[in-house]
Amino acid sequence: MAIVCFVSGSGTNYQKIVEWDPDHDYIVFTNRPDCGGVEKARANKHITIELSHLPYLQDARSKYGSARIPRNCAQRVRYEQDVWRLIEDRIEKAPDLICLAGYDQWLTDWTIDRYYPRILNIHPGDTTKGHAGLHWIPTAKAILAGDKEIRATVFIVDKGEDTGPVLAQSRPLDIIRALGALESEGTRGLIAGFEGIVRFARQHAVTSYDGFESLADAEQKTTMKKLCESLQGALKKVGDWEVYPFAVHALLARGRVQIVDRTVYIDGRRMPDHGYRMDQELPR
C-alpha cells in the first residue's frame, strides 16, 4: 500500500504505524518543515514532502484573524490542491490510505470529496459519545459526563469535526486506576483533584464542558487541565499507539474493511456505531 502520513509534530503515531509493518510504501507530508515527524521519516528513509501553510494563509489571517480562518476558504483549498499535486506527482498515483498522524490543520471539503473514505484520524476520546474537541478537552468531557473509562477512536474523516464513521476503538483506560498508577509514578494530587472536580460537578449539576468553563474558578480549571493531560498521556500508550496501527494493518491492509456510504463492515459484518473494539469480539 501507498500510505501517506500527515504530521505536524513529533510523528509518534506515524512511527507506531511503521513499526507494526514497515513493508509498505510510506510517504510523510508535513506543513511544518523540519518537525520531529520529518526527522523520523528521514531516519526511516521514507519519502518526505514539506510545504508550509503559513504563506498560503497570510491573507486569510489578516482578513479573519488567525483563530477564525474558515475551514473551506479559498486559501486553504489552494494550499491543499498544491499539497496533493506534490504528493501525487512524487508517487505517480493517488495514495491507498491517508493517515492524519498529529496533523494540525483542518482538511477542506475539497480533499474529503476527493479521497473519502481513505482518510483516517485518531481521536483521544469516544467520538460516538460526542467527546470531540482539541487537546485534553475530550477527556474533560468524559469526566463531566460521568464516564468511568476513556478510549481512543480511529475514524474515517468526513466534513464534520470528529464526526466520521468509526472504524475501531482502543481498549478502555479505567480513569481511577490510571490516576492511581500515575500517582505511584510520582505525579501527586491527581486523585484528590479528580474527586474535587467530580464533587464540584455534582454540586452544580454540571455535565458539559461549557457548563464547567462558565462556573469553575481558575484553580479548578488548572486542576482539570492537569488531570486530563495526565490521562491522555496514559491513553496514548495503551490506546492511540495500539489501535491506530491495528486499524491500518490488521483491518485495512488485510482487506477486511468495506465502507458503504457511512456504514462500516468488517469481515462482512456490519459494525455498531463504535466500530471494532479491541477488547471485544466482533458481533455475530
Image (cartoon, rainbow, N blue to C red):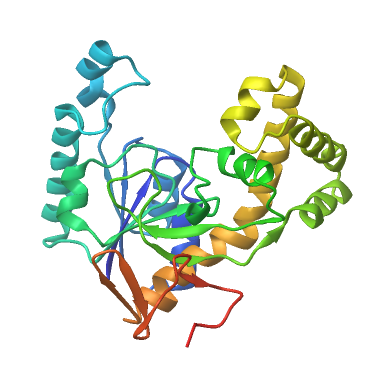
Q: Residue at x 23, y 19 (%)?
A: 60
Residue at the bottom extreme?
Answer: 284
The quarter of the displayed image where residue 207 is located: top right
Horizontal arrangement in the rendering, residue 177 relative to residue 152 (left or right)? right
| Residue 254 locus on image (x, y percent) | 35, 82
In the rendered view, would you say 269 is above or below 60? Answer: below
Q: Residue at x 63, y 47 (%)?
A: 142
| Residue 208 locus on image (x, y percent) | 60, 36
The answer to whether residue 24 of the structure is visible from this angle is: no
The quarter of the displayed image where residue 27 is located: bottom left
Q: Residue at x 20, y 16 (%)?
A: 59
The answer to whether residue 252 of the structure is visible from this angle is: yes
Quadrant in which the N terminus is drawn: bottom left
Residue at the top extreme?
Answer: 62
Horizontal arrangement in the rendering, residue 168 relative to residue 26 (left or right)? right
Q: Residue at x 31, y 81 (%)?
A: 255
In the rendered view, would you say 156 is above or below 64? Answer: below
In the rendered view, would you say 227 is above or below 98? Answer: above
In the rendered view, would you say 139 is above or below 250? Answer: above
Q: So how many labels did they put on this image?
A: 0
